[in-house]
Amino acid sequence: MTDSASFKNANAKAANLEMLPDTRRWTVPALVAVVIGALLSAKVWSEDQSLLLGGYLNAWLCLLEVVLGLHVLRWLNNLTGGAWGKPFRLYSAAARPLLLLAAILFVPIAVNLPAIYEWASPASASDPIIAKKRLYLNVEAFQIRAVVYFAGWLLLDLWIRALERRALRDPSEPNERKVRMRSAQALLFYGLSMTFGSVDWAMSLEPHWYSAAYGVIAVIGQGLAAIAFTALLTARKERQEEFAHPELAAAAHKPDARHHHPGHRGAKDHDTHHPTLLQDLGNLMLAFTMLFTYTSFSQYLIIWFGDLPEEVVWYVHRFEHGWQCVAAGLLAFHFALPFVALLPRGVKRNPRAMTIIASWILFMRWLDGVWKVGPAFHASAAAGYGAGATLLAYAGPGLLMAGLFALLMAWLLPRQAEIVEIAYGSRSGREAHA
């Protein structure tokens, strides 16, 4: 490598580091979350192992939502172009090892299937409905499908990253076309695999019930979680810049700030963290919040109109034992509150407000998972565990997984500054027109 190339790469890496939020403050809160989560999980394990496994399943699904969602949005940006995809490229590259970690963390679920899934327990052998689904719902097929899902996601991601680097070195149309083609193939595989994965990992908790919309709702939820996480980190970085450069930050939030203040750090070279990008992320959160609510309500409305016993039973379990309060809370705080909060343009350009809203949406994603997973464990409900007790029990694995995720991201982000090189030089022409 020539001296000029080395100097250029060093400058690029330094610039990339400036695009990252300061992760040093994450360590202590993340460690506290891990310790508290571990203690709560140990207590629940000593009382009811199936209850803890349900909480672990929900926490793992939340982790997968963010990690896989980041990769999928990067693949989508390969097709559409646009500067909105830069933060997703940045954080998905840092989260790349976490996709492999999610596969490893699936092992406790795979080895405890009889304790989690009714169809995997010996008692289900005499169930006539499950017997009709046995060709699909059996332990061997379940585990093989999981291997196929993760192997496909990991291999496709490696393939696309190699093509992205090649397109960066040689930004020719054939190389960019290969990136777009492989990204389209990855999105197609993701759509199919995540639909089946949501059936395997969540819907089959109640094997007598089914919904054609369940996979679509799961995919939209993943997108919402990934966008909220990206908006959270982008807002945190913008707040850091406000503290460091208050006068420039104030100017950046004025109309047409990008044109009147070309010297601002976010105006040109570092537009990965700029109020207009934060507004784009806010618009995406608003759109996905509405889309998630629309598909979820459509599922409810169709089942309510059909009024078939094998379909309504899923909602019956979620409107008793205190779960009706959680459902009302989700309607008010997972949809209505974010919807109203994200309507004003000024809110979406305000880093402090976006930090709060994005964090809240991530919490709501966890709560939505608890509402879907928790009532499925009928044995625990029969033993006296309602919504309140289940929420407390699920908080342990949730804190443990969230703390572990934050620690790993805090360690990975500053050590992979060069990953932003694929954020994405060969697409700058199309992004300039986006």
Image: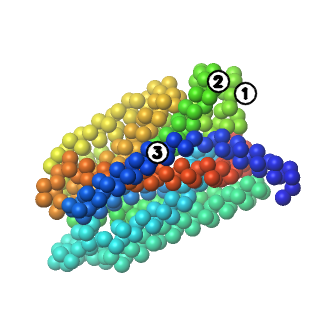
Q: Give the residue at x 23% y 74%.
A: 121
Task: Using a 10 Å C-alpha cutoff, classify the residue at mark 1 as few (fewer than 14 neighbours), some (14 to 19) or many (20 or more).
Answer: few
The quarter of the picture where residue 59 lies is bottom left
Name the residue carrying label 2.
Answer: 248
Query: What is the spatial separation of the Cα atoms under label 2 and label 1, in whole angstroms?
Result: 9 Å
The answer to which of marks 3 and 1 sits earlier in the sequence is 3
Name the residue carrying label 3.
Answer: 28
Task: Using a 10 Å C-alpha cutoff, classify the residue at mark 3 as few (fewer than 14 neighbours), some (14 to 19) or many (20 or more).
Answer: few
Left or right placement of residue 381 versus residue 119 in this view: left
Q: Determine which of the numbered discs, if any, sits on residue 228 in the image.
A: none
Compare residues 285 and 234 and report the one nearer the observer: 234
Q: Give the residue at x 39% y 74%.
A: 143
Q: Is residue 259 above or below residue 80?
A: above
**Residues at marks 3 and 1 touching, judged by CB atoms closer than 8 Å:** no
Query: What is the spatial separation of the Cα atoms under label 3 and label 1, in whole angstroms?
Result: 35 Å
Q: Identify the element where label 3 is drawn.
A: helix
Name the residue carrying label 1.
Answer: 263
